[in-house]
Image (cartoon, rainbow, N blue to C red):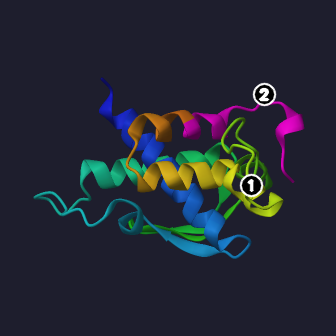
């Protein structure tokens, strides 16, 4: 099993959701806020886990999911914000995520978003669900009819 890929999905989801909660403001996106404190190695370099999380954030920027002005050493991305592509994908409806019921339409709409579903999966520490939902962020061929915005 490729554990670094599971970490990638969690880090990508956590980073995108942090930016989603701040959207449209630009923020400093700290690795430590996403994965917790990691002690540097014996040479003072960030841990492999820390470097992997930072690498995930930079990959997201290179692939057009976020923008940032500069890196703050190995600690953060400064002035980071979601791109339109990431915003539209996070606000997209996840098919069959919410059953019709007594909830008001606005609540059903919010709970059906990919962002809400990702947030729930991360809170529940449900690794398989986090991986599946994060992959949905990267899928560009989802049907437009399920868009919320």
Q: Is residue 32 above or below residue 66?
A: below
- Residue that label 1 marks: 108
Number of numbered discs on residues: 2
What residue is shown at x 43% (from left), y 34% (from top)? Answer: 128
- Hey, which residue is sitting farthest left in the picture? 42
Q: In terms of depth relative to the viewer, which is nearer, 119 or 102?
A: 102
Which quadrant holds the C terminus? bottom right
Magenta range is 133-149
Q: Is residue 109 above or below residue 94?
A: below
Could you tell me which secondary element the residue under label 2 belongs to?
loop
Helix, strand or loop status at disc 1? helix
Asked whether residue 71 appears in the rendered view, the answer is: yes
Residue 148, horizontal then vertical, whole percent: 84, 50
Q: Is residue 138 magenta?
A: yes
Instruction: Provide residue 68's location: percent of width, then percent of height.
Output: 63, 64
Residue 24: say if magenta. no
Badge 2 crowding class, 10 Å Cα cut-off, few under 14, some 14 to 19, many 20 or more, is few
Badge number at residue 141: 2
Q: Between marks 2 and 1, how big is the CA–CA gap? A: 24 Å
């Amino acid at each position: 099993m490729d554990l670094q890929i599971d970490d990638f999905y969690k880090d990508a989801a956590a980073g995108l959701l942090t930016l989603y909660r701040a959207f449209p403001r630009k923020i400093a996106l700290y690795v430590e806020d996403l994965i917790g404190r990691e002690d540097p190695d014996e040479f003072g370099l960030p841990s492999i886990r820390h470097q992997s999380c930072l690498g995930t954030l930079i990959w997201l920027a290179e692939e057009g999911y976020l923008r940032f002005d500069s890196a703050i050493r190995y600690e953060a991305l400064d002035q980071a914000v979601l791109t339109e592509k990431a915003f539209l994908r996070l606000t997209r409806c996840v098919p069959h995520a919410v059953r019709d019921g007594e909830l008001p339409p606005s609540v059903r709409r919010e709970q059906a978003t990919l962002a809400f579903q990702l947030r729930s999966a991360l809170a529940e520490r449900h690794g398989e669900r986090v991986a599946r939902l994060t992959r949905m962020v990267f899928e560009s061929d989802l049907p437009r009819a399920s868009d919320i915005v």
